[in-house]
Image (spheres, helix red, strand yellow):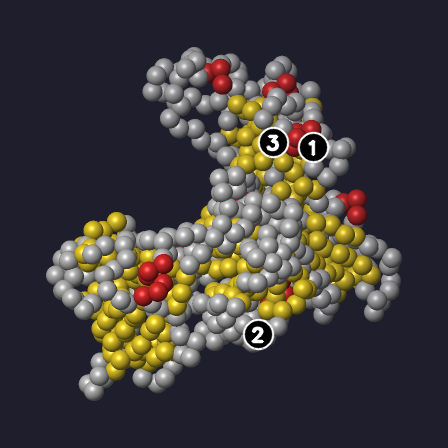
Amino acid sequence: MARLQDRKIEVLSARTADSTTYALPSGELETEAYAGPIRVKQDGEWKDIDTTLSNTGDALQPQTAAADIMVSNGGDTELASVAKGKESFGLGWQDKLPAPSVKDDTASYNLGGGQTLSVTALAQGFSENIKLAQQPDGDAMSYRIPLNLDGLRLFQADSGHLLLKNTNGDLVAEAPAPMMWDASKDEASGESAHQERVDTKIETANDGSQTLVLTADKDFLATATYPVTVDPTTTLAVTTDTWIQYPNYPDSQVGSQELKSGSYDGGAHVARTYLKFNVSQFTGKHITRAMMSLYNYYSATCDTTGATTTARWVTSAWDSHTIVWGSEPTLTTVNMAENTGHWGYNSSCPPNWSYWNLTGMVQDWADGRPNYGIGIRSANQKDSTSWRRFRSANYTTAGYAPKLVVDYNSGPATPGELSVSPLKAGTTLTTAGSLTPTLQAKVNDADADSSLVTEFRVEPDPAFADTTYTWTGKTAAFRPGTVARTQIPTASALPDGSHLRMRARTSDGIDTSAWSGWESFRVDATAVLPADLPTQLQAGATDTSSPLVTGIVTSPNGGMVEAQFRLGNATGTQTLGTQLVPNGERAGFHIPADRLTSGGPFDWSMRACYEGKCSAWTAKTSIVAGSGAERAQAAAGSSVDLTLTTATVCTDSDACVGETGTALKVGSVSGKNWLTYLRADMSKIPAGARVTNAVLKLQSSATTPEVDVHALNEAWATTGTGAELDSVTARRPT
């Protein structure tokens, strides 16, 4: 379908929570993998994550999220909670909350005294912060936040991180140490020039209940540029992207809404990012393109002449929760990718996506090498222009998460079940009963939209070595799951009595399968029997000046049968033409109009041939052509039959030119590849008429193949060569 419509189409059955897969017109697949969930399955259907808050009566809830998230709508002390399965984590508040103002995914509570408490719904949880519009009265500002935990318990690491563990002691989620910052800005880093860690304690009562106590330093508040933001907690989300920074953020910042890389002050502060994508679906695939994109919302400069930002293959295991500066995983520069873009510094280089070509790296993973993830760092970590900040998978607004887009091809399977037709019965060795047999093989491809071509190779069987014959030929294009067929052309007929072998391989235009094993066979055409007398003769379209005559042809030898047609009158007979069709199928021929203009009455007859051994001619049947005159102009709401100008042409060489007055051919016939061209005479349709339905009807004398119909871009002549006619063909099927 993607090939026919010339556009990529999503493969709905391949959707996951963190990836989207498309079929491409080339026959490849393309998967967009994200560092966090972008959709969730509800009631058996995938729904895109939408964290916009709406009032359900009891609380505020996001439209669609990957967890059960509740935010207070005021009048209680239950600030926010998130639940996954049997485990839940909630934050309370020390006083009853006022009704919030709600905008998109954020609820804001006016606490008075210039203090605003905000909660933002995320894909997997929520984040919370407190904004102080002015310096508070008194000394230090302290907040007591009751915790509502079910199946979980909060701990504080030596680094200051908040660790949420279940009853088995397993880490469920983590938040960086609470921080606070003021409104000042360092132009180089884009961050607050005045930031500090918030004093954090976890109090546990005798009944096991816990309270998070946050205290802002009074000296910081006294010298701060307001407003000041206190950012105590983040989400329950477990993601695989994080960053570390020397010297002020030496441990993992997992759960942060951003990622960082490089330096803004000559190496005094240096950041590095680590992230990982799920690439299991690409195992064993041929990766044709893999691009990682990060949304770069701030850089130290717009200048792109400094050190590049590199994406390197991580070669040892690491944990996004426990990684610390100085104890990081190893990296390699093999298949390293670089990016020179700097975005977000000012209006001259506004925020934008940055891209890294990871084709070689992802191919290594597809080939079975371990995927430990990707390290992002500056090529020169002392270069002050290398500082860059990106959105992480935890960023509150959807659509900015790190993304890996991979185009890949499965490659066709090795052909199997090779055979020749017709086969001669009663022999111990596979024996072809024709000098021009049909070669066939069963072929498949995991990419259902692929267009396949199978190549056959025939050579002497070394066990007998009784000939020097060789031949190589290809099939016309076909779809996966079908039998690939091509016929040995008469000009390359097999030597009778020889022993040969054949093999096959298939290409989808991108990858080629391995050769199949050899299949040996013998040629014995000495007992070829004449074809049978054609049956079920018909004459159609006799109201036109070029009537169609047909009949079914069969042969006891099987294989392809040639139908021959002739026209007679009182002075004798003349040969009209031939058509090659599979055994037992109907063959047809359009009698050219110039053959029926004078000298009648006329009759026609036909016979069937196989390997030059023909049946008798059928009895003569009268044929009368119509005048071929144009019908009257069609009235409104009526139907008309349009006369077609046709040409059929092979595309194998420039010597092939259009044929008229013969049966129309498409695909592989008689060892050649054929296309057919048609042009309708539109004079019967009134100018300005609205066409409500148009149907092209073609009678097939054989099993109808899958046929593409294309528009033609310019005028064409029936006598043109295959290349000339192909040049006027539009690439996109109608």
Is any atom of residue 40 visible in this view? no
Lower sequence index among marks 3 and 1: 1
* Residue 638 relative to residue 497: left or right: left
The residue at the point 22 percent across, 80 percent down is 209
* Residue placed under numbered mark 1 in the picture: 722
* Residue 425 relative to residue 550: left or right: right
Is any atom of residue 313 visible in this view? yes
Lower sequence index among marks 2 and 3: 2
Q: Which mark is residue 729?
A: 3
Q: Nearer the viewer, residue 334 or 233?
A: 233
Residue type of the residue flagged with mark 3: Thr
* Residue placed under numbered mark 2 in the picture: 326
**Closer mark to the observer between disc 2 and disc 3:** 2
Secondary-structure class at tag 1: helix
How dense is the environment of label 2, judged by Cα within 10 Å: few (below 14), some, or many (20 and up)?
A: few
Lower sequence index among marks 1 and 2: 2
The residue at the point 43 percent across, 28 percent down is 694
The residue at the point 64 percent across, 23 percent down is 716
Secondary-structure class at tag 3: strand
